[in-house]
Image (cartoon, rainbow, N blue to C red):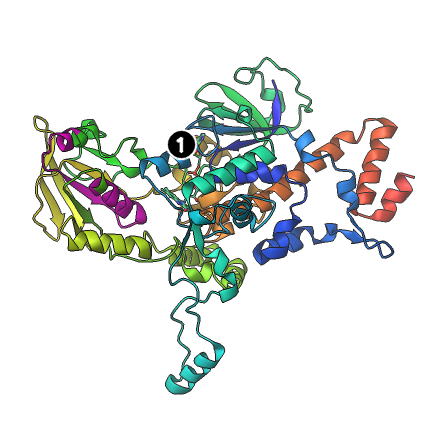
Amino acid sequence: MHIHDVIIIGGGPCGLAIASRLREHTPSATFTDDEHQRYHWIRKHGQKMNIKNYRSGADYNPKFLHKPHAKDGLDMLVIDAEGAKWMTRWNRLFKTFSITHLRSPMFFHVDPADRDALLAYTHENCRQCELQELPGCVGKEMSKHRKKQRRKGSGRISQSGPDIDERDRHDYFTPSSSLFDAHCSKIVDRYQLYEGMIRHDAVLNIEYTSVSSFDECEVGSDISNCSSPDDESAFRLTTRDGVYFARIVVLAVGPGNAPSIPSIPGLLQHTLYLGHCHAMQLNDFPSPSVKNKIAKRASTNILIVGGGLTSIQLADLALKRGVTKVWLLMRGPLKVKYFDIDLDWVGKFRNVNQASFWSADTDEERLEMFLQARNGGSITPRYRKILDKHIASGKIVLHTHTTLKSVQWVPDTHIWTSVVSSPSVSFPEMDYIVFATGVQSDIRTLPFLQKFQKEHPIDCVGSLPCLNDDLMWNDDVPLFVTGRLAGLRLGPGAPNLVGARVGAERIAWNISDILENRKEKNSVGKGVEGYEKEALTQYASGRRNRFDSLIDGH
Ligand SMILES: Cc1cc2nc3c(=O)[nH]c(=O)nc-3n(C[C@H](O)[C@H](O)[C@H](O)COP(=O)(O)OP(=O)(O)OC[C@H]3O[C@@H](n4cnc5c(N)ncnc54)[C@H](O)[C@@H]3O)c2cc1C
């Protein structure tokens, strides 16, 4: 049986962010620019700051001088349910939805080396033409003078309009999907995160238990080099194909849960894929039956349920691919925003919001801020224009504040009749229904964590776990969580690329601490050499009492 140092579950952006960060040995590049990360870093690792030699001016960190290069020392494996390549799910969805550009700005990426890495990569490779400006996002800031004038006039400051500095204009572009993809490939190359380290497999169960109870071999391996003492605990991951072992596990599973279609009378199990589907389950769009009708030049109608960007992207794509008319149903109003989160969490005053998120007294308050900043699905101003154009030409019919109540499937003709909504709308017969209703993420219902949560209960607020500040399940169980499920610690950007990078930063420091502590612990009792080494490490790292280390380890 072989025990990996770290297993990352999920090879999406969050998984890639963690893996690359674990192999980046000068990550401080990110701290200088991003106060959020600095805030956490100083709180937790401030005492391990570099020491400046007052004569030469050179920086050195005694601890890192003794630390093996992570790349050489860390035994890391990634398990992903969708494929043995990085970003398989991301790439599948972007291809299926034909998304040409990301929604997020240039500093939303997963490169641990530099906050401006995506921008730099773009210029280095002369790919500026693949950037799309976010019109109206920058340059509408009100000057202090105008604010003062307004205050004099109305007695209060207007809070409307985005506050983004003109000097940050270069950040407010969105990269093309292929540019972003190329940048991710560059990260994979730079940190040598080749595909051999990713297994295409699905985790079905997680246990954290004593190593002495492990008696199986890992999938596809006959290695039995378990160097752990029997009293040590580790993770056993049961997967579709077998079993894996790890000292530390990182959950980077995105929303985690499978997409769920609202239960609507008339939707049948056997019409899944044939007549209806969740957007996240689409592999081919429009469906083969609709494509057949289009080929025969017959008229086609598609119903799309959902108020986020995906529903408009799919509606536009359907029309481009020959569908005659699309009916859009939203249970709320149509919301238009640049990003999934409010600009205040991205722009000039993001630190104020992040600090108040962090300093909130309770997780209930944090959840409230999280929900308020995201506020459900929204579309971008660019897609608003596309939508308006289609509505004007009569190709899209939009019904906001409307819920789908029931449908009826006619098996012979493969169409939906009697489509009923509230309030009532007169619908034609539909050829296909797509639910772009998002994924209801809930840690309590994740199938592979059911047994684990009974053995290691955790408080939840909303559907999110109350992790410790290190993004760990609790102080004794080194199961780290990143991405959307770490929303109560990472803030409203957690489900996005920015959350991936910030999460990776915080988790990587703790992983390296845990592994180092373990090494120190194991060197105790291994003779004089091990003892001296440990004393020296303690002295160098400035942990505990330095004078004790000197006396004991002289
Ligand atoms: C169409 C679309 C476009 C988007 N565009 C943007 C954008 O432009 N900018 C932005 O910031 N955000 C965007 N987002 C949000 C986006 O989802 C996140 O930024 C990003 O995908 C989050 O990465 P992740 O790694 O947390 O999750 P995911 O990308 O969902 O990756 C999770 C991975 O975990 C794997 N997994 C899950 N459960 C298991 C299991 N039990 N065993 C093994 N593997 C498992 C999955 O197979 C998956 O590959 C977009 C989302 C969608 C759907």
Residue 326 picture location, percent across and down: 17, 44
Residue found at x 39% / y 42%: 442
Residue 546 picture location, percent across and down: 84, 48
In the image, 51 versus 190, the foreground residue is: 190
Q: Quadrant of residue 446?
A: top left
Q: Quadrant of residue 430?
A: top left
Q: How many marks?
A: 1
Residue found at x 55% / y 26%: 197
Residue found at x 52% / y 64%: 167
User: Can you say which quadrant of the picture contains the N terminus?
Assistant: top right
Q: Confirm whether residue 362 shows in the render.
A: no
Residue 270 picture location, percent across and down: 19, 26
Is 293 in the magenta? Answer: yes
User: Can you say which quadrant of the picture contains the C terminus?
Assistant: top right
In the image, 365 versus 539, the foreground residue is: 539
Residue with the most extreme top position: 222
> Tag 1: Cα neighbours inside 10 Å, few (<14), some, or many (≥20)?
some
Q: Quadrant of residue 539?
A: top right
Residue 377 picture location, percent across and down: 32, 51
Q: Which residue is mark 1?
A: 447
Q: Is residue 498 above or below residue 254?
A: below
Q: Which residues are magenta?
A: 292-319
Q: Amino acid at mark 1?
A: Pro
Q: Judge left or right: residue 156 versus residue 209.
A: left
Q: Confirm whether residue 217 shows in the render.
A: yes
Q: Judge left or right: residue 265 versus residue 199.
A: left
Q: Judge left or right: residue 247 versus residue 541.
A: left
Residue found at x 17% / y 35%: 267
Q: Is residue 382 above or below residue 210?
A: below
Cβ at disc 1 under 8 Å from ligand 1: yes
Q: Ligand 1 is located in which of the four quadrants?
A: top left
Is 222 in the magenta? Answer: no
